[in-house]
Amino acid sequence: MDAPNPNKQKVGILREELEQLQKENETLRLMFEVMSSKYRLLHEAYLRESSSTICRGLTRFDLHEQFSDKSLRPQVQLTAASSSHVFVKTDPRDESLIVKDGFQWRKYGQKVTKNNPSPRAYFKCSMAPGCPVKKKVQRCLDDKAFLMATYEGQHNHDVDPTIGQALSSPGSSATISATTPTSEFRVPVNPFRPGITLDLNLSGSNHENSNNDNRNDKRIEDCVASLAKDPGFTAALAAAVARSIVEQPKPPTP
DNA sequence: CGCGTTTGACCGGCGC
DNA sequence: GCGCCGGTCAAACGCG
């Protein structure tokens, strides 16, 4: 009776592993549910904002100003491919036209435009010599809490890592912010690259380390908000997560 | 002194 | 052709 049955011992180990995997599975399921619910909420908020704040800004600030200017129509048609508009929420009392997007910019001009009393500032990227990227920053006509940055061109270098780490998406990135009466959400976008780079590193420590709850929540929000920008990727990710939940984890083979 | 910002001047495109 | 407008240049200026 002293010698333990090796089979029973093996079964015990396997059972332990199984329980551990089930716990992990449950955790992942909960995370997925949280992500899904947050995604739904944020997507609804995003759609609301798209049809109100941002679209209002675009139609009255950008579209009105640029589309009404027939000289810019060809450029506007190229906008989707060669330039991007980013709304950045700032303190309306802050009169500086500074958009912290992870790059260093050198201001080379400022103009007061016809349709907006707020001056428009012109910046060139100064992080790398010869970088062709320019941006224009102007306070939104309707909501002075927002700055609209228009980026043109592609960077020929990477983002400053010390600044980039503070942003949720690696590489070049900027933050769109939009407010609803009750909430604020941030949508990380990448105005210079075709794809959206997401940090989906939702490690198990998320639920183990309560000190990181706020940061993890924010990261999840950032991820979810990014998903809202790309329905195709949303579907692909949802399918992948669903698969990982449906598929029972197999015990490790020796 | 070097670097970045400011700001008036200048240029080019477009509409009338 | 002229005027308007957005975009850019470059000298002056300020700051560390």
Image: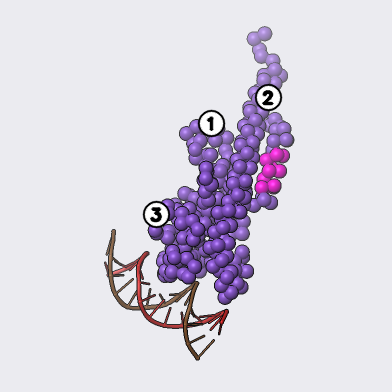
Chain colours: A purple, B red, C brown
On screen, residue A193 above or below C1: above
Give the residue type at disc 3: Arg
Q: A104 or A79: nearer the eye?
A: A79
Residue at 67% x, 45% y: name it: A237
Q: Name the subunit of mark 2.
A: A
SS label for mark 1: helix
Is A119 magenta? The answer is no
Where is mark 3, residue-wise?
A: A93
Residue at 51% x, 35% y: name it: A213
Q: Locate residue A248, reporting x and y percent.
A: 72, 32
Q: Looking at the image, tell me whether mark 1 or mark 2 is earlier in sequence order.
A: 2
Task: Find the distance from the CA under tag 2 to the CA under tag 3.
Answer: 62 Å
Q: Locate residue A95, reporting x and y percent.
A: 39, 58
Q: Is residue A251 rendered to the left or right of residue A214?
A: right
Q: Locate residue A41, reporting x and y percent.
A: 61, 42
Task: Find the distance from the CA under tag 1 to the CA under tag 3.
Answer: 40 Å
Give the residue type at disc 1: Glu
Where is mark 2, residue-wise?
A: A14
Give the magenta-colored segment's residue range.
A234-243
